[in-house]
Amino acid sequence: QKEVEQDPGPLSVPEGAIVSLNCTYSNSAFQYFMWYRQYSRKGPELLMYTYSSGNKEDGRFTAQVDKSSKYISLFIRDSQPSDSATYLCAMSADTGGFKTIFGAGTRLFVKA
Amino acid sequence: GAVVSQHPSRVICKSGTSVKIECRSLDFQATTMFWYRQFPKKSLMLMATSNEGSKATYEQGVEKDKFLINHASLTLSTLTVTSAHPEDSSFYICSARDQGTSGADTQYFGPGTRLTVL
């Protein structure tokens, strides 16, 4: 079993749709949860950062962490064609040298 | 958010030559930087963890003599691909750990370097 599981997609939605991206994990020591957006041939860009459980909202993006279920989500409201990218979940713990484990990434296509 | 730069963005070299890639944290100090490799449509593969002032820690299967890492200052880490071969062609991305200056203890990535070995 991988430490972090993420459906690679692709996920195709019409413009304006609500997008739900998810990851599950197995290591209960993870405390830091991130979502990165990566456009083709570019480095990942940090979108959302959450420490421990809870929700965090930033504009059209909402990140949720449910540590009891070992499940994290990223919601994108009013999706735009410019949101088309690969979204990587990532998580890390204070132990083990702060090694960050990444999901496989979900490719999202938002159609105009 | 914190900014990490990477240079060069693209390099083409002949087989057998060495290539150096620089990674800089521009607005924060990073005691820890990471080097990743990414193949097309694949996720990030951690190659090594670079700690300022000490030897890098390499992941299993990564040749330390082939991928030389130097982290000489709190804002600069370099990756040198020695005696490059076509199979080393890839997208190399660095990241730097920002321990809270931007409000989060997390990694910020550089824009990546595309290496093509002929």
Image (spheres, rainbow, N blue to C red):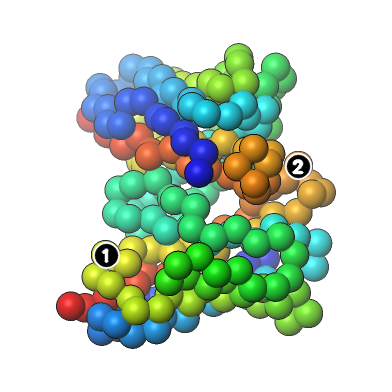
The picture quadrant where one finds residue B19 is: top left
Q: Left or right: A81 with respect to B108?
A: left
Mark 1 belongs to which amino acid? Answer: Ser
Please provide percent x and percent y for residue A97: 76, 42
The chain under label 2 reads: A
Please provide percent x and percent y for residue B36: 50, 41
Residue A22, numbered circle? none
Q: Nearer the viewer, residue B4 or B50?
A: B4
Q: Which residue is mark 2?
A: A97
Q: Is residue A35 visible?
A: yes
Q: Left or right: A75 with respect to B106?
A: left
Q: Which residue is mark 1?
A: A82
Few, some or many C-alpha atoms within 10 Å of disc 2 (few <14, some 14-19, many ≥20)? few
Q: In the rendered view of the protein, which quadrant contains the C terminus of chain A?
A: bottom left
What is the distance, in whole Å, between disc 2 and disc 1 at their CAs? 35 Å
On screen, B99 above or below A30? above
Q: Is residue B79 visible?
A: no
Q: Give the residue displayed 47% in from the left and 34% down from the top.
A: B4
Q: Earlier in the sequence, mark 2 or mark 1?
A: 1
Asked whether the residues under the numbered discs 2 and 1 touch, taking CB atoms below 8 Å apart as contact, a structural biologist would say no
